[in-house]
Amino acid sequence: MKIGEIYEILDTISPFELQESWDNSGLLVGDYGQSVERVVVSVDIDMKMVEEADEKTLFILHHPLIFSGLKKLLWSSYPANLLQKMVKKDHAVIAMHTNFDKSHLNRYVFEKVLGFEEFSCQEFICRAEGSWRSRELLDMVKERLGLSAMRVVGEKDEIKSVAMVTGSGASLLDTAEADLFLTGDIKFHDAMKAISLGVMMADIGHFESERHFSAALAEHLKNLPIPVIIAQSINPFTYI
């Protein structure tokens, strides 16, 4: 298939125009007229993935490999070290980041992974109302996201509303409008702000909350006439 054909399919699934102004989703490596023989879907990409991939592979990633302006391409530095090998192997990269967060990923994780059946979604934020004991609710979240531990701020006993943003969503605290806000990458000052607002926050991890990107997208690519491979993204962090 031509990359342009696949790009149009992806744009129908989750329009690239939905991405935030600071984002860099879209075709990042390759050419619309370039032919590819297989698709690999992954949250991120690493050297092992590049080295093991066959030539003429299109990577559809959640995180843009090229995010901000590159002033140098030094083959010993990230991401140039990956780009050098990818160009030699006729690889290509399309990123689906904040556009897919808005259209699919947050909803997929909230409903399919965490199991909230009645909820609403607005932009990035998914919300549900109900009645939960906070410890029981957090134990469920930990189990379904594969978390061994969770950082919690402003713990409450009872929860009447819960909101969630996958990845790094603490900047949306002001618009969460919930007793409990689930998101990743919670910083110290985010925690202090949550306490001042009377909001309970729980850190669900950046990788752990977004690792379902591949499954969420792959179900929409079943009819492509070329193989679609779900890659097992690697969490860059280890816990000791």
Image (cartoon, rainbow, N blue to C red):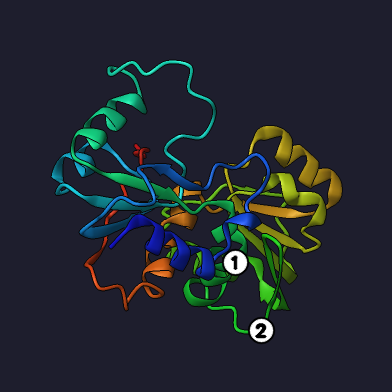
**Residue at screen point 49% across, 56% down:** 209
- Residue 63 percent location from the top left of the image: 46, 45
Q: Nearer the viewer, residue 215 or 4?
A: 4
Residue located at (25% from left, 37% from top)? 86
46 versus 219 height, above or below: above
Which tag is nearer the camera, tag 1 or tag 2?
1
Q: Is residue 4 left or right of residue 187?
A: left
Q: Name the image quarter holding the C terminus.
A: top left
Q: Earlier in the sequence, mark 1 or mark 2?
A: 1
Left/right of residue 93 with respect to residue 39 in the rendered view: right
Q: Secondary structure at mark 2?
A: loop
Q: Which residue corresponds to the image point at 54% horizontal and 60% vertical from the top-left?
A: 100
Residue found at the far front of this picture:
33
Left or right: residue 199 compared with residue 168: right
Determine which of the numbered discs, if any, sits on residue 118 in the image. 2
Determine which of the numbered discs, if any, sits on residue 103 in the image: 1
Residue 195: quadrant of the picture: top right
Q: Dot 2: within a 10 Å radius of its alpha carbon, few (fewer than 14), some, or many (20 or more) residues?
A: few
Rendered position, 213 above or below 159? above
The type of residue carrying mark 1 is Ser
**Kind of residue at badge 2:** Glu
Q: CA distance from mark 1 to mark 2?
A: 17 Å
